């Protein structure tokens, strides 16, 4: 009787809390006013012609977590074609200008240090977002392992039903509802950490691309000889995307793999006993082979970037001198030169990279199957008693746990490869950002008001006074002296 009182008391307390939470949610979800004081659209001194803030900034905590502040746009899109003006304004704190300004402050601090580090500047700027995502991801992983525990209890309840040792029927309802609730909470937490990952990736890509572009405006003549326009464009497109994807999204997920493997192996040991160590041996044996494949693929990826930079550089030279090429009818030789780099070097490296990636996927798939098969085989042949016979409960729970650790086992190989590729890109961008700039002390900027009544078309906007120029900084002789324009 005491167990029934405890069960129904827990249900009553949980139901009361759920009703109060639902009431608070409904009250909090009511639309809020746009601003405390509504400004006129033509009051540019205070509102800059804008009397409405971003809907994300007006959203309450429930609307922010559930993304219901996007409902007006989604409802409008279900009935009409979404135009550019229908898209909600981005939050000021998340605008490209604000994101870039935060990173530039950290990068300037790094430039003042003895050994500037692009990676350290990223961590100094976005460490809060990265740590928050790791915390949410850890909670997601811990919640995920509640499912096999509840599944084991539910299967045990079903197996003992209509027997003297059967549990009350209420337990079966509780296990079923708990599995549903855990899946629901897991989906909600998964949405939060994925959304935060997309935002981190956006911040990193915006910061990296902006930093590369700003640097291209101040490169010295020495640095421009080393970095062509094609290489700079390649860094803005390829390297920035790789850095933002790894550090913003997948990198945090890879860091959770040791936790997932550890908890999964422990729960498997509690389920199957010592036979699980056969699967652990299979994983350990595969580590050297996986590391070798990761190293080969890293080298091929580095070579592929070199071929791509060389091809883009030749294309840039062709476009710059297209008039001369057309005048002398040199189209065919240059097409052959570009095709040779593309077909015989770049695509050949892509083919080798694809072969290695296919073998890597085959090894990962075979490894997951080997771990499951070997553990069941050893338990059936040599144990089959420490945790009972290999029945339905043991098989389903073990398969669930094996499925859960399959992703981190396969992802461990990808993590090593992605980390190496990302840090290659980080070093490329870092060496570019620390390259020499033009002599800013020789340039004077003065404010000029085009709308002024004194402004005229004859005003001098750019001038050179007593200018001395040379192509390479180390050269002693000047190519141009005392230039006045």
Image: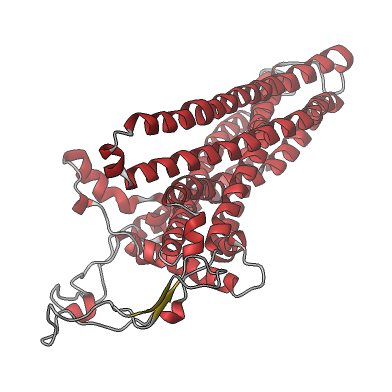
Residue 359 appears anywhere in the view? yes
In the picture shown, does residue 383 fall above or below 267?
A: above
Q: Residue furthest right?
A: 382
In the picture shown, does residue 297 fall above or below 157?
A: below
Residue at (56, 31) in percent of width and height:
176
Residue 1 appears anywhere in the view? no
Residue at (31, 50) in percent of width and height:
70
- Tell me residue 218's x, y (percent): 43, 67
Q: Nearer the viewer, residue 34 or 303?
A: 303
Q: Residue furthest top?
A: 381
- Tell me residue 33's x, y (percent): 25, 67
Left or right: 380, with 24 as reference point: right
Residue at (61, 34) in percent of width and height:
300
Look at the image and name its color scheme.
Answer: secondary structure
- Tell me residue 196's x, y (percent): 49, 52
In the picture shown, does residue 434 fall above or below 63?
A: below
Q: Quadrant of residue 53?
A: bottom left
In the picture shown, does residue 350 fall above or below 310?
A: above
Q: Nearer the viewer, residue 277 or 294?
A: 294
């Amino acid at each position: 009787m005491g167990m029934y009182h405890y069960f129904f008391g827990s249900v009553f307390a949980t139901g009361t809390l759920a009703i109060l939470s639902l009431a608070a949610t409904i009250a909090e979800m009511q639309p809020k006013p746009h601003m405390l004081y509504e400004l006129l659209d033509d009051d540019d001194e205070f509102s800059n012609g804008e009397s409405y803030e971003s809907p994300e900034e007006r959203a309450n905590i429930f609307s922010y977590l559930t993304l219901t502040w996007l409902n007006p746009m989604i409802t409008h899109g279900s009935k009409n074609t979404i135009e550019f003006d229908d898209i909600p304004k981005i939050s000021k704190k998340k605008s490209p200008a604000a994101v870039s300004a935060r990173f530039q402050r950290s990068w300037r601090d790094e430039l003042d240090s003895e050994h500037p580090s692009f990676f350290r500047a990223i961590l100094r700027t976005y460490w809060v977002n990265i740590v928050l995502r790791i915390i949410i991801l850890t909670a997601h992983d811990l919640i995920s392992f509640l499912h096999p525990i509840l599944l084991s209890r539910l299967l045990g309840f079903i197996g003992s039903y209509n027997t003297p040792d059967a549990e009350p029927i209420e337990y079966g309802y509780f296990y079923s509802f708990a599995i549903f609730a855990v899946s629901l909470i897991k989906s909600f937490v998964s949405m939060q950490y994925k959304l935060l990952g997309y935002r981190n990736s956006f911040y990193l890509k915006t910061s990296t691309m902006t930093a590369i572009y700003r640097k291209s405006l101040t490169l010295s003549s020495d640095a421009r000889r080393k970095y062509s326009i094609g290489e700079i464009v390649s860094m803005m497109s390829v390297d920035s995307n790789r850095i933002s994807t790894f550090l913003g999204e997948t990198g945090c997920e890879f860091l959770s793999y040791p936790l997932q493997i550890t908890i999964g192996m422990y729960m498997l040991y509690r389920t199957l006993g010592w036979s699980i160590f056969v699967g652990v041996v299979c994983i350990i044996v595969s580590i050297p082979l996986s590391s070798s494949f990761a190293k080969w693929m890293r080298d091929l990826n580095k070579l592929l970037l070199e071929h791509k930079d060389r091809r883009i550089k030749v294309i840039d030279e062709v476009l710059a001198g297209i008039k001369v090429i057309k005048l002398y009818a040199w189209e065919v030789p240059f097409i052959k030169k570009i095709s040779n780099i593309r077909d015989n070097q770049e695509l050949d490296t892509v083919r080798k990279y694809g072969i290695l990636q296919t073998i890597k996927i085959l090894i990962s798939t075979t490894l997951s199957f080997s771990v499951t098969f070997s553990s069941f085989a050893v338990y059936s042949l040599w144990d089959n008693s420490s945790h009972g016979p290999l029945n339905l409960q043991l098989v389903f729970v073990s398969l669930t746990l094996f499925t859960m650790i399959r992703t981190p086992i396969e992802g461990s190989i990808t993590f090593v490869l992605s980390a190496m590729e990302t840090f290659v890109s980080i070093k490329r961008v870092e060496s570019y950002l620390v390259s020499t700039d033009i002599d800013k002390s020789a340039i004077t900027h003065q404010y000029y008001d085009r709308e002024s009544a004194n402004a005229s078309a004859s005003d001098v906007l750019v001038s050179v006074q007593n200018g001395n120029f040379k192509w390479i900084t180390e050269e002693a002789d000047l190519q141009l002296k005392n230039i006045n324009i």
